Image (spheres, rainbow, N blue to C red):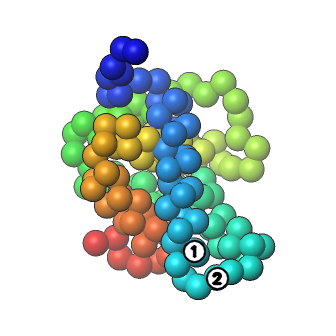
Amino acid sequence: MEKQNYAFMNTTALAFIGDSVYEIYVRKHVLDRGLVNADILHREAVKFVRADAQAAALKILMDELPEQELSLVKRARNKKSATKPKNADPVDYKLATAFEALVGFLYLTQNHDRMEEIIYKTIDLIEGKKGN
């Protein structure tokens, strides 16, 4: 199998994997808070995976991204979408997809320390904590 150059991969494909990776971190985060009821776990997790929450966090994080990551985020954000979001503002949806593409890229390039830094900052921002 040919080795992929993930920096130039379709951003929708990067977001596809990034969504899954981020979801696992979010689920672990809410589980680590001591919640055990599945309905409550789901409701809590939704707060972190909503497009508007991811978009708001990414807007803050964009000022801190190095050029390669910022370029990827902008490419993902500006990609023409074949589908319309059902329950999200289109701008927020594009930014959330860009966030997920960044997570996917960092995961696939095995830059796990940086990926976790971005994920944990995002979780903190969504919870209303400082992103430091």
Quadrant (top left, top right, bottom left, bottom right) of the C terminus: bottom left
As helix, strand or loop, the secondary structure at mark 2 comes to: loop
Q: Which mark is residue 8?
A: none
Image vertical order of residue 96 relative to residue 46, above or below: above
Kind of residue sitting beneath label 2: Leu
As helix, strand or loop, the secondary structure at mark 1 comes to: helix
* Residue with the mark numbered 2: 35
Res 93 seen here: yes
State the residue at coordinates (35%, 28%).
Answer: 6
* Residue with the mark numbered 1: 30
Residue found farthest to the left:
66
Kind of residue sitting beneath label 1: Val
State the residue at coordinates (41%, 24%).
Answer: 9
Res 63 seen here: no
Where residue 63 appears, as percent x and y from the top left, is: 28, 54
Q: Is 113 on the left or on the right of 94, as rendered?
A: left
State the residue at coordinates (75%, 73%).
Answer: 38
Quadrant (top left, top right, bottom left, bottom right) of the N terminus: top left
Which is more N-terminal, label 1 or label 2? 1
The Cα atoms of the two marked residues, 2 and 1, are separated by: 7 Å
State the residue at coordinates (47%, 30%).
Answer: 11
Q: Is 124 on the left or on the right of 81, as rendered?
A: left
Where residue 108 appears, as percent x and y from the top left, is: 38, 37
Asked if the residue under mark 1 is in contact with the one under mark 2, i.e. CB atoms within 8 Å, the reply is yes
Where residue 77 appears, as percent x and y from the top left, is: 47, 36
